[in-house]
Image (cartoon, rainbow, N blue to C red):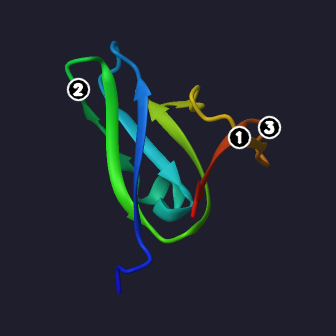
Amino acid sequence: GSVGNRRQTFSITAPAAARVQLLSCFTNWQQQPINLQKGPDGIWRTSLPLEPGTYYYRYLVDGEWCDDPDCPLVVPNPFGCLNAVRQVH
């Protein structure tokens, strides 16, 4: 069941954006992107339960790939960009 799940929040500041999506290994990348909700502070957020593990993710901001500027841990991906890394314990 959901015993092992930890609720994880993903957020990015993009006050001018019309649409922000979270893409990750758990969304099959572009197959099932998660739409973030924009707050009045210009920060887009979503939270979702994740099993403990290591996850790689990026944002799509108005269709443009975007790094997570607040993520201290990144790894190069095969496309010459960087994936952010989220560790869930």
Residue 84 x/y as whole percent: 64, 42
First in residue order: circle 3 vs circle 1: 1
Seen from the viewer's position, the closer of residues 32 and 59 is 59
Residue matched to label 2? 39
Q: Residue farthest to the left?
A: 40
Residue under numbered circle 1: 73
Label 2: few (<14), some (14–19) or many (≥20) C-alpha neighbours in 10 Å: few
Q: Nearer the viewer, residue 82 or 55?
A: 55
Which badge, 1 or 2, comes first in the chain's sequence? Answer: 2
**Residue under the point 50% across and 64% down:** 26
Q: Secondary structure at mark 3?
A: loop
Give the CA distance from mark 1 to mark 2.
25 Å
Number of numbered discs present? 3
What's the residue type where badge 2 is placed?
Answer: Gly
Dot 3 corresponds to which residue? 80
- Mark identifier at residue 3: none
Tell me the amino acid under the disc marked 3. Answer: Gly
Residue at the image point whose x is 46% and y is 60% from the top: 27
Kind of residue at badge 1: Leu
Mark 3 vs mark 2: in front: 2
Residue 7, horizontal then vertical, whole percent = 37, 59
User: Is 85 on the left-hand or right-hand side of 12?
Assistant: right
Residue 88 sits above or below residue 11 on the image: below
Q: Answer with the quarter of the image where residue 4 lies.
A: bottom left
Q: Which mark sits nearer the N-terminus, 3 or 2?
A: 2
Q: CA distance from mark 3 to mark 1?
A: 16 Å
Spatial CA span between label 3 and label 2: 31 Å
